[in-house]
Amino acid sequence: MYGRRAEARRIATVKNLTAPRGTFDILPPESSQWQVLERIIDEVCARFGYREIRTPIFESSEVFVRTIGVGTDIVDKEMYTFIDRGGRSISLRPEMTAPVVRAALAHNLLQTLPLKLYYRGPIFRYERPQKGRYRQAHQWGVECFGAAGPEADAEIIALSLEMMRAVGIVDYRLEINSLGCAQCAPAFREALVAYLSEQAAALSETSRERLQRNPLRILDSKDDLDRAVLAGAPTMERFLCESCQQHFADLRFLLESMGIRALHNPHIVRGLDYYTRTVFEIHSVALGAQDSVCGGGRYDGLVQAMGGPPTPGVGVAMGMDRMLMLSRSSGAAAEQDGQTRLQVAFVALDDESARLLVPVLQAVRARGIAADMDYLRRKLERQLRAAGESGARFAVIMGEDERTAGDVTIQDLATRARVRVGLTRVDAELAQRLA
């Protein structure tokens, strides 16, 4: 009796297992939409001259503490950090730029510049899950090292917008700003802190905490209390040095000449300490209050901060989860999903027919045709219905009659027309019909 109760509890526990909060399973047919998105990322990045890099999903915690910065929400509150069996502090990556720089330095990739890389994969942040934002999210991005001029900034922005268009997202706006450089940014920070300190009582609780740790992040606050205070705050454009002014003006000219409309938003700061000069974000109202789809900018001091030579850099990161949400809302994802559906369904009505069809199925697949076979030996009508629901165009049917004659019946699932074809000619016949 005790053993049966324990087994019942074990089964109930297994049945109640779910994905951890803030994560999700990607199931068919949604997984095919992810595959389409990944192929689009590969194609667009290659068209712009970028090559893929893949880094581990966990790194030494120092990689992120040194680059993102102590006092940021990511390092202080959001990183998944643990001590491994060797006593080392390890963190699941909360972003990918720092790991890419680490890999570039470890493998001497910066010996030949410019270096243009792209990536895609999961990132991890412990934050409150919400629409389009998860604790395990998925991100793609590009990094361009070695180019200090605004042309590289313009290329990164153009690539980002091309990616939006490629997945069918049309409802968006581009916002840009300049954070200055090491020469002019400190004066702005000092003026901003002085102003916000005088207004501290009117700030939200979160921004009062940030005032001590990372005051620039207050500029990005969506809280109504903070927005009222920021209306009178100093802006970076008043403090830009001549070189930064020229860089920003040249970028705006380049974007205009490319037909790209950009709005100047002086409150864009990005969430990471390593950004300098150009920063930008792409927003979509379809996502609600948290409407940022992607963001990026220039980080000319990051490589040197990680122990490398002085190397300018600029990049962008875009949430794949949010891209798919927007793509689905526009209907583009469903249209793309149709590109990966099954083309041919093999229907075996008995065991011997199944054995004869297996090598034929392999020959059809070898021709690049998406084909599958139902191994459950269900009745003909049920198998044909399932084949139609899968999106297949043709069914290849074999029962005792076909097996005796050494052929199969090919049925067009749209017109119901049938034709008998010899076993050795099935792959060629299907290739011709699907051409």
Image: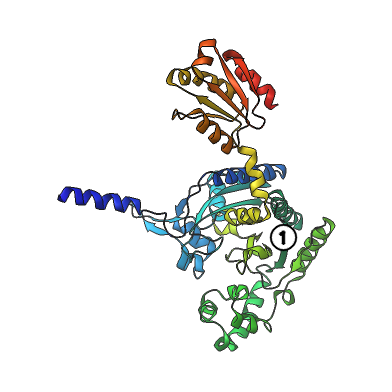
Quadrant for residue 202, please give it: bottom right
Q: In the image, what residue occupies the spot 67% across and 30% down?
A: 415
Q: Is residue 21 above or below residue 385?
A: below
Left or right of 401? Residue 284 is: right
- Kindly give the residue lying farthest to the top in the view shown: 405
Residue 81 position, x and y percent, is 41, 59
- Report the residue marked by disc 1: 171
Residue 68 position, x and y percent, is 53, 63
Left or right of 154? Residue 7 is: left
Badge 1 local density, few (<14 within 10 Å), some, or many (20+)?
Answer: few
Q: In the image, what residue occupies the spot 51% across and 61% down?
A: 66
Say which amino acid is labelled 1: Asp
Q: Nearer the viewer, residue 391 or 44?
A: 391
Q: Is residue 169 above or below residue 117?
A: below
Left or right of 281? Residue 68 is: left
- Kindly give the residue lying farthest to the left in the view shown: 1
Q: Is residue 260 above or below residue 112?
A: below
Residue 399 position, x and y percent, is 50, 19
Residue 285 position, x and y percent, is 67, 65
The answer to whether residue 51 shows anywhere in this view is: no
Q: Quadrant of the C terminus?
A: top right
Q: In the image, what residue occupies the spot 45% across and 51% down?
A: 58
Q: Is residue 185 above or below residue 303?
A: below
Q: Nearer the viewer, residue 408 or 244?
A: 408
Element at label 1: loop
